[in-house]
Amino acid sequence: MKLFAFAFLFTSLIYCQVNFDDYFSNKTLRLDYFHTGDKNHDSYSFDEMKEEPFWGGSHKNLIDKFNVGAYKVVVLDDSTKKEIYTHTYSTLFHEWQTTDEAVVTSKTFSESVVFPFPKHKVEVEFYGRDRKNNYVHKFEYKIDPQDYFIKKERNLEYPSFKVYYAGDSAVKVDIVILPEGYTKDEMELFRNDCKKFADYLFNSDPYKQNKDKFNVWGVEAPSMESGTDIPAKNIWKKTILNTSFYTFNLDRYCMTSDNKSVRDLAANAPYDQIYILINSDKYGGGSIYNFYSACVHKNKYEEYIFTHEFGHGFASLADEYYTSDVAYKDFYDLTVEPTDPNITTLVNFESKWKNLVDKNTPVPTPATPEYKNKVGAFEGGGYVAKGIYRPMQDCTMKSISVNNFCPVCKDAIIRMINFYSE
C-alpha cells in the first residue's frame, strides 16, 4: 500500500513538474517530416519547421498520460535532457502499413508534430511501436528556437470564427472544423453546418455534460469546386484539402494525405483536434487519433458518423465492429493487449475495464439477452470475429447508433476531456 502511494505520488510529481512559462511561449512550433516505408520497415526524414500563432493545448498537462496511439513524440530541454512535452498519436502511414499495397511497395507520407514554441534549445525524439506495442526510438532532431529557417510565413491564411466558445483555450478542448469542397458561395452553408455538427457532438453523453469544457472554431476557406474526389466514379474535384473517397481502396473511407494543407488551414485557430467537414452526401469519413477526423455533411447517418469518428480521433477508441469490409490485414496482434481503451485480447484484462465487470458476469461474456445491458467482454471487435473482445453488446463504436457510448468508452472520453481542460 505504501509502495503504491509512493508510486502514485511520484507519477503525479512528474506530471506537475513542467512549468509552461519556464520552457514555452504561447504559440506553436510545427515540425514537418517524411515517413517512408513498407509493411515491415519505416524511416523518418526532416522536412521543415513552421511557427504558428496559437497554442490550443493545455498549459498544465504537458506530459501525455495515455499509453495509446501508434507513435510518441518527446521534447527534451537540450541543456538538462528533461522531458518537457510528450504526445501520443497515430497516422495514415500506420494504417497503410496493414494494407495489401504495403506488402509489395514502399510509400512516403507527409506528417507533422506540433508542440508549444520552445524558449530554449530542445531535442525532439520520435518513437514508434513494434508489433508487441513496445516503443522503439526512430528519429531525433535538435531545434534552436532562434533558427532563422523556422518559417513564419503562413499558407492558407483565412478568417476563423467561433462556433461555440466556453473560454480560454488553455483550459478547454479546442476543435477546429475545416471546410472541404465548400465553394465561396457555400460559406454560409458551411457556417450553418458547423453549428449543426457542434450540436450533434453535444447531443451525446458524455460531451453533453461537459459542454462547458469545449471551444469549437470554424475556418472560412472556400474550395474552387464543390464536393470531393470519388475515383471509382471518375469524379475529381479541385478542393482545398484534397480529400478522396476510396482511401486504401475502401469506398466509404474518405481521407486526405495532404497533411501540409490540413495543418496550414488548422493553424488559423487554436486547436487540440482537427475535424474536416466534407461537402458530400455519400456515406463516409474517417479518423486517426490525434491527427484529424473527417465526416460528410449531407447523409442521413451524418450525426452518427460525426460522433463515431470523433471517438477515434479524440480518445483513441477502436472500432468494435467485425463484419464490415476494411482495408486492413492483421491490424492487431492478438498476443498482446491493444492500446485502444475499449477493446481487449484478454491478455491483460486487468489493465482494461475488468473493474467495471460485475462479479456474476462471466468473462468472456455470451451475447445473450441476459447480458444485453451489462458490461463484460463480448467476442468480436477490432475488425475480427475471434480473439478481440468489446465491453458491451452494442455501442456507438460498433453500430450505427446515436448517443450510445458504452461506459468504457464514456470513461475514456471523460479522461481525455479532463486532460485538456484541467
Image (tube, rainbow, N blue to C red):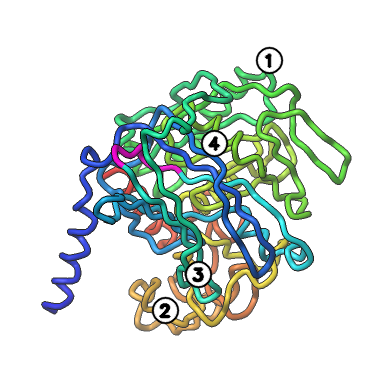
Name the secondary structure under disc 3: loop
Name the secondary structure under disc 2: helix
Mark 1 or mark 4, earlier in chain: 1
Residue 167 drawn above or below residue 49: above
From the top left corner, tell me how far across and down residue 71 is, in percent: 49, 59
Q: Nearer the viewer, mark 4 or mark 2?
A: 4
Which residue bears the numbered disc 2? 349
Which of 217 and 120 lies nearest the eye of the viewer? 120
Give residue 105's quadrant in the image.
bottom right
Q: Which residues are magenta?
A: 114-120
Which residue bears the numbered disc 4? 263
Give residue 396's quadrant in the image.
bottom right
Residue 316 drawn above or below residue 338: above
Of the residues shown, which amino acid type is indicated by label 3? Ile
Question: Residue at horizontal 63%, vertical 67%?
Answer: 41
Q: Nearer the viewer, mark 1 or mark 4?
A: 4
Query: What is the distance, in whole Å, between disc 4 and disc 2 at their CAs?
Result: 37 Å
Q: Quadrant of the N terminus?
A: bottom left
From the top left corner, tell me how far across and down residue 96 is, in percent: 67, 59
Query: What is the distance, in whole Å, between disc 2 and disc 1 at their CAs?
Result: 53 Å
From the top left corner, tell me how far across and down residue 285 is, in percent: 65, 46
Mark 1 or mark 3, earlier in chain: 1
Query: What is the distance, in whole Å, between disc 3 and disc 2 at their CAs?
Result: 10 Å
Q: Are marks 3 and 2 in contact (CB under 8 Å)?
A: no
